[in-house]
């Protein structure tokens, strides 16, 4: 508990976390920890209002304050921060995307991840334990080689492994060749890994708050106020109209609803995506294994739970729960790969609403409505981009124009044909 | 066959009479796996009997506006009309099953399948589709006092006799595969059920049924070819 | 888990027998060559994605193989009605809801525009 971080006038100073602080608080029976962010009353007007207090919205606010000296900002969240997909995801972080545009975006995020705990003075438990993307047939292996080559040309680490090397990295995996979909090899990104999802939301919230950003929870945006073709504020259910010079919507699965308030459509479908965790068991898996072909992926949390992810449900759904057939399908896939976990009990299952786009790439863009910006379409795989997404979206909101990384991800690409087809690399989920 | 027919029809069993069924293309869907009779052998107290039926002739019949004409033609050749929704009709060796509002599957003796196909085509000048699928499917039969129990372990469909009564036929999922399930003979005490399965799934389903039926003393056989 | 009533089999069947096939009533453009990029992009990529009552296409894949329409609430997941392709469904605002929340008075007419 030493040096206070920089804070805006009138905002209580945020104490820094440190090893010494931990010991000190332990002696004080953990009763004197400071609140990590304030619970302010919304002002009538902000320079920038960010709708959606997930990781991306909070990161946007943080970088706006830190990089662009904007502090008159509010993040408006209808539930609690991180309660959307941010707090529901399986936390895989990697940057081995095929196409240049996507590779640049996710690698930008990866570089920020690598310094994030220090930058936020908050342990986001980013663990670069490596990610394997398995190949089960010759075409998978050709795609993997192509992708790894593309990654290396973009300066992103990656290796092509054969089945034996996979078995060395993941001894519990059945690489015997006698399975229905034998493991032939994998792509391996050593710098990839996992992070603690809640900590990412909390760390960015605490950081943004320390600069004076108002984080307003339990407040639902029910309309976008538009005057002369330009957005001028948001209507909220709990606090009336909150005015803003610029508005950024970062509302994941509900982005289509928000666009509807503003009078335009997005090329997005919202689908349920589910995940599961098992009871905690002793360490058996120290990396992340993903398979698009058998359709499941698994890692083990520091607590010992097996964290398992699935594919999306085929229908549009806003229900934050997934369907039973997908559970069965996913468990089949996991047992095929890891027969020894067949007796492990599953503890919890839940779903999020993922905002899928036709080219499996996000939309970070201006919109047909002036002063209204969207950052959405992250679908099944946006957690890994959280710091990068916030960083480039902050730039867009501050300057009004996208930077080189964000530019290809514009809203108009679905009409002029400049799609970035990342399906090959991203498969369906993660 | 009429000469102006634009459809190429292949007799899948042309060499049948010449060289005998075994030499023809249509061997058992289990031939490669040599599976039966791996399970129980007691016939006396087995609660369920699994039988691979001998390869039979199968025609997929499809018609929309000409369904009535097709039905009439079928009646005159086989003595049964096209079945109504979720039903099947049987006359001796002929059985027709409803698959969809515009599709039926007719089973008949293998030797007759080519002749029936030709006759039906000749009888209907308009737009219909008839495909000989004899080589694409296998028929398995489950019977006995516990046949229904085995079904219940394998499909989500409600197989209670009130719901799947005699003669009813449904396409549904079965142990993750897709089957056409027909209640051949059903009463409170026991049942006889037919599974029309894709040939490439036969060995998988056979193994599944052997396992699922083991606790009821399943006995497995193949009908003579 | 959905129990879906197939309007062709006229029975409720388990979700696993079906596949969702996206938004319903999307007419295929008759003359794609004469369309602007914007119109073509709209046809290919833009879907209503409604939170609430939504019309979608499902196929009874493991059953009769037929495509049909479903009126479903994408938030509560309640299925209001299923109806054959080529039929129209009255707007749900006029639907009378039964004790279990199912729509009782949906009516299907002959042909629709799209
Ligand atoms: C089961 C699952 C597993 C996943 N696994 C991975 C993975 O392994 N790796 C990976 O990279 N990605 C993964 N993802 C995707 C990832 O979670 C998301 O892309 C990412 O978290 C999106 O962050 P966000 O901040 O944009 O959205 P969210 O965290 O969903 O935040 C949006 C917020 O907007 C709020 N909101 C919505 N409407 C309104 C309104 N009208 N007014 C106010 N607030 C509103 C919501 O309450 C929500 O808190 C997974 C997703 C799911 C569901
Ligand atoms: Zn049906």
Image (spheres, helix red, strand yellow):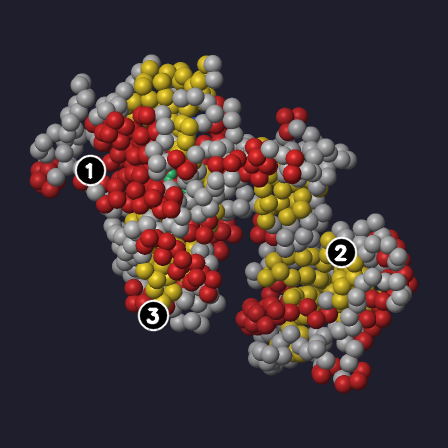
Q: Which picture quadrant has residue B99? A: bottom right
The crowding category of the residue bearing disc 1, from other C-alpha atoms within 10 Å (few below 14, some 14 to 19, many at least 20), is some
Does residue B80 appear in the picture of this structure? no
Q: Position of residue A248 (x, y in %)?
A: 38, 27
Q: Position of residue A337 (x, y in %)?
A: 40, 63
Residue indicated by mark 2: B103
Q: Which picture quadrant has residue A403? A: top left
Q: Is residue A62 above or below residue A231?
A: below
Q: Are marks 3 and 2 on the same chain?
A: no
Q: Are marks 3 and 1 on the same chain?
A: yes
Q: Residue at x 77, y 53 (%)?
A: B102
Q: Residue at x 51, y 23 (%)?
A: A263
Q: Residue at x 76, y 56 (%)?
A: B103
Pointers 3 and 1 in contact (C-beta within 8 Å): no
**SS at circle 2:** strand
The crowding category of the residue bearing disc 2, from other C-alpha atoms within 10 Å (few below 14, some 14 to 19, many at least 20), is many
Residue indicated by mark 3: A164
Residue indicated by mark 1: A119
Q: Chain of mark 2?
A: B
Q: Chain of mark 3?
A: A
């Amino acid at each position: 508990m030493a040096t206070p971080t920089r804070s805006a006038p009138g905002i209580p100073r945020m104490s820094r976390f440190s090893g010494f602080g931990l010991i000190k608080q332990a002696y004080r029976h953990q009763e004197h920890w400071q609140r990590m962010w304030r619970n302010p009353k919304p002002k009538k007007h902000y320079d920038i209002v960010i709708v959606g207090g997930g990781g991306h919205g909070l990161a946007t606010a943080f970088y706006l304050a830190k990089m662009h000296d904007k502090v008159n900002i509010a993040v408006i969240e209808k539930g609690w921060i991180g309660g959307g997909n941010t707090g529901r995801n399986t936390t895989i972080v990697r940057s081995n995307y095929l196409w240049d545009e996507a590779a640049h975006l996710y690698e930008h995020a990866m570089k920020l991840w690598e310094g994030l705990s220090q930058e936020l003075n908050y342990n986001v438990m980013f663990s670069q334990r490596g990610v394997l993307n398995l190949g089960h047939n010759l075409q998978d292996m050709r795609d993997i080689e192509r992708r790894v080559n593309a990654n290396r040309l973009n300066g992103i680490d990656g290796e092509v492994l054969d089945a034996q090397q996979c078995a060395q990295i993941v001894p519990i995996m059945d690489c015997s060749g006698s399975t229905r979909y034998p493991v032939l090899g994998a792509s391996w990104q050593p710098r990839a890994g996992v992070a603690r999802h809640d900590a990412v939301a909390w760390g960015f919230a605490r950081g943004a708050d320390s600069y004076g950003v108002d984080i307003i929870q339990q407040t639902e945006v029910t309309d976008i106020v538009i005057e002369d073709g330009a957005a001028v504020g948001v209507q909220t259910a709990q606090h009336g109209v909150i005015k803003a010079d610029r508005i950024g919507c970062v509302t994941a699965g509900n982005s289509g609803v928000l666009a509807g308030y503003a009078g335009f459509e997005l090329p997005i479908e919202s689908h349920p995506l589910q995940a599961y965790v098992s009871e905690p068991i002793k360490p058996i898996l120290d990396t992340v294994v993903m398979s698009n072909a058998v359709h499941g992926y698994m890692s083990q949390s520091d607590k010992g739970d097996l964290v398992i992810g699935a594919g999306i449900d085929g229908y549009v759904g806003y229900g934050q729960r997934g369907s039973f057939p997908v559970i069965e399908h996913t468990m089949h896939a996991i047992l095929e790969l890891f027969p020894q976990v067949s007796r492990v009990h599953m503890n919890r299952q839940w779903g999020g609403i993922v905002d899928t786009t036709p080219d499996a790439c996000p939309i970070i863009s201006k919109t047909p409505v002036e002063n209204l910006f969207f950052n959405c379409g992250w679908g099944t795989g946006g957690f890994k981009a959280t710091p990068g997404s916030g960083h480039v979206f902050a730039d867009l909101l501050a300057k009004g124009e996208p930077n080189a990384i964000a530019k290809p991800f514009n809203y108009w690409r679905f009409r002029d044909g400049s799609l970035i087809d990342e399906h090959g690399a991203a498969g369906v989920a993660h | 066959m009429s000469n102006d027919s634009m459809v190429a029809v292949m007799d899948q069993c042309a060499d049948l009479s010449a060289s005998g069924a075994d030499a023809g293309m249509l061997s058992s869907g289990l031939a490669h796996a040599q599976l039966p009779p791996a399970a129980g052998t007691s016939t006396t107290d087995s609660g369920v009997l699994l039988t691979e039926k001998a390869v039979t002739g199968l025609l997929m019949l499809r018609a929309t506006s000409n369904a009535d004409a097709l039905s009439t033609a079928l009646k005159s050749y086989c003595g049964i009309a096209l079945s109504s929704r979720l039903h099947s009709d049987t006359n001796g060796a002929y059985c027709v099953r409803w698959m969809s509002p515009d599709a039926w599957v007719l089973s008949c003796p293998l030797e007759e399948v080519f002749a029936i196909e030709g006759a039906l085509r000749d009888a209907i000048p308009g737009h219909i589709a008839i495909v000989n699928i004899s080589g694409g499917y296998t028929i398995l039969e489950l019977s006995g006092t516990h046949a229904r129990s085995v079904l219940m372990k394998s499909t989500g469909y409600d197989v209670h006799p009130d719901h799947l009564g005699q003669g009813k036929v449904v396409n549904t999922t079965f142990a993750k595969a897709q089957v056409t399930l027909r209640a051949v003979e059903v009463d409170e005490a026991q049942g006889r059920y037919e599974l029309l399965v894709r040939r490439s799934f036969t060995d998988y389903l056979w193994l599944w049924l052997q396992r699922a039926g083991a606790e009821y003393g399943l006995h497995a056989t193949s009908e003579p070819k | 888990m959905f129990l879906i009533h197939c309007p062709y089999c006229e029975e409720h069947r388990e979700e696993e027998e079906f596949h969702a096939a996206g938004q319903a009533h999307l007419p295929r453009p008759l003359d794609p060559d004469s369309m602007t990029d914007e119109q073509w992009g709209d046809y290919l990529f833009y879907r209503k994605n409604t939170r609430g009552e939504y019309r979608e296409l499902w196929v009874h894949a493991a059953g009769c193989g037929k495509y049909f329409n479903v009126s479903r609430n994408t938030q509560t997941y309640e299925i209001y009605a299923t109806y054959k392709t080529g039929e129209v469904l009255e707007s749900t605002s006029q639907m009378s809801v039964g004790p279990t929340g199912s729509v009782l008075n949906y009516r299907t007419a002959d042909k629709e525009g799209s």
